[in-house]
Image (cartoon, rainbow, N blue to C red):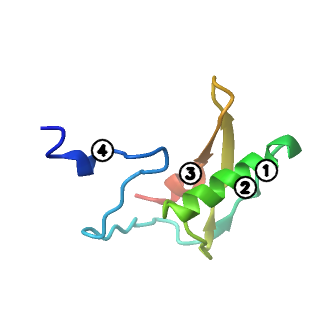
Amino acid sequence: MLDKNADVFSQHPVDYGHTTTVQHEIPLVDLRPFRLPYRKIPPFQWQDVRRLLMEMETAGVIRPSKSPYVSPVVVLTMKDGSLQLCIDYRKFNSCST
C-alpha cells in the first residue's frame, strides 16, 4: 500500500507538496495593505537563513513576491541546533474572514 501511494509522501526535507489542481483565494475584510517590519536575525544565523531560503526557493516552496501584504519571518532554533523558518501571519489572519 505504501509503495502504491509513495507519491503522496515527502521524499526529502523541503518536499512540502504542491498542486495545481486547486486555486485558493483568501477573502479579506480589511483591504488596506500592510508591511510589518522585519524581525532582527542574529548575524551568526544570516548564512544559515540565506541557505535555507535558497533551498526552499530551488525546491519551489517559496518564490519572490511583490505582495502588498508583508509578514515577518521568524527564525526558530530546534533542539538539534538546526533552524526552522516560520511566518508570523497574525496581522494577515486578523484581516481575513
Q: Amino acid at mark 2?
A: Arg
Q: Quadrant of the C terminus?
A: bottom left
Q: CA distance from mark 3 to mark 4?
A: 26 Å
Q: Can you say which quadrant of the picture contains the N terminus?
A: top left
Badge 1 marks a residue whose secondary structure is helix
Mark nearer the N terminus (2 vs 3): 2
Residue placed under numbered mark 4 in the picture: 9
Residue that numbered label 2 is attached to = 50
Which image quadrant for residue 67? bottom right
Name which residue lies at 55% across and 64% down: 58
Residues packed near mark 3 inside 10 Å, few (<14), some (14 to 19) or many (20 plus): few
Check disc 4: other Cα within 10 Å, few if <14, some if 14-19, many if 20+. Answer: few
Amino acid, disc 3: Tyr
Callout 2–callout 1 Cβ contact below 8 Å: yes
Local crowd at mark 2 within 10 Å, few (<14), some, or many (≥20)? few
Q: Which comes before the other along the chain, label 1 or label 3?
A: 1
Residue type, label 1: Gln
Q: Spatial distance from mark 4 to mark 2, Cα to Cα?
A: 26 Å
Please give the residue where the numbered disc 1 appears in the rendered image: 47
Residue at the extreme top: 79
Mark 3 and mark 4 lie on one chain; the one further toward the N terminus is 4
Q: Whole-percent x and y of residue 56?
A: 56, 57
Please say if the residues under marks 2 and 3 sit with CB atoms less than 8 Å apart. no
Which residue type carries mark 4? Answer: Phe
Disc nearest the viewer among 3 and 4: 4
Q: Are marks 3 and 4 in contact (CB under 8 Å)?
A: no
Residue 71 in view here: no
**Residue beneath label 3, please?**
89
